[in-house]
Image: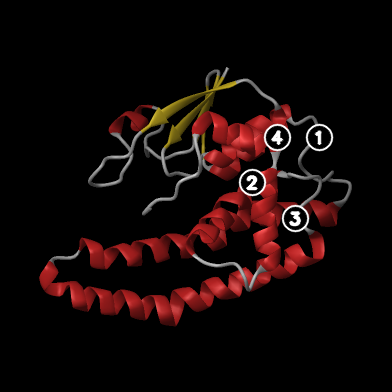
Amino acid sequence: MIHVHHLEKSRSHRILWLLEVLKLDYEVVVYQRDGKTQQAPTSLKKIHPLGKSPVITDGDLTIAESGAIIDYLIQRYGNGRLQPSPDDMSAWVDYRYWLHYAEGSLMPLLVMQLVFSQIPKQSPWLIKPLAKGISDTVSKRFLKPQINQHLAFINEHLLAHGNFATPWPSGADIQMSFPLQAIASIQSLDRYPAIAAFVSRIEQDEAWKRVVDRAGPLAMPGQ
């Protein structure tokens, strides 16, 4: 039996989505964040030393990192599904690119945006104006331009292809779901209609609806 160690307000919903798409039996072990620090409980470190989520256990194996988990589940249980065949090397390379791009390029910017947005809230009242000024400057001059550049890039790809790799949903689509859902939760996607359509497609997917029924709606850190 596969166990998904699921931390609230984390990236593990997409792993549940993959399991539902593959129609695998699994159990969800839920962990609550600390009310003050918003960090994972120490009990999660008993599963993996870093105490991060998602983590799955499958028999004697413990696998962390979303991309590694997606790779493992598709390789072991996919029977050739959810990723292009290596015979089509161009499609296979494109699939791998988006599978790694989600955490390697896009999510670091979103995490920085979250961290800098929290700095004024966590600062002593005496320096709040200074902290807010620094936060706003970093966001305006660096983070927002970079994120907008990435969103335009993603939107262009989706306009041309509809999703990140065939067939729907591929492992790359599942990996890209969280950052794009996170963006959709904090800003308008009017300038990026293909991304908006992609997020809507996730929410209409029957396997995703089963995830929401089982684990509740996706919630983002900082919300």
The Cα atoms of the two marked residues, 4 and 1, are separated by 8 Å
The Cα atoms of the two marked residues, 2 and 4, are separated by 22 Å
Choose the circle earlier in sequence order: 4 or 3.
4
Q: Which residue is mark 3?
A: 163
Choose the circle earlier in sequence order: 3 or 2.
3
Residue beneath the point at 79% across and 51% down: 92
Q: In the rendered structure, which amino acid carries the disc numbered 1?
A: Gly
Q: Which residue is mark 2?
A: 203
Q: Closer to the camera: disc 4 or disc 3?
A: 3
Choose the circle earlier in sequence order: 1 or 3.
1
- Mark 3 is surrounded, within 10 Å at the Cα level, by few (under 14), some (14 to 19) or many (20 or more) other residues, namely many
The Cα atoms of the two marked residues, 4 and 3, are separated by 18 Å
Residue 43 seen in the current view: yes
Choose the circle earlier in sequence order: 2 or 4.
4
Badge 4 vs badge 1, beta-carbon distance below 8 Å? no
Residue 62 seen in the current view: no
Q: Which residue is mark 4?
A: 74
Left or right for 49, reference 11: left
Q: For numbered disc 3, what is the local secondary structure?
A: loop
Q: For numbered disc 2, what is the local secondary structure?
A: helix
* Residue 9: quadrant of the picture: top left
List x then y, in percent, for residue 25. 63, 20
**Along the line of sight, which residue is nearer the eye, 217 or 161?**
217
Q: Which residue is mark 1?
A: 80
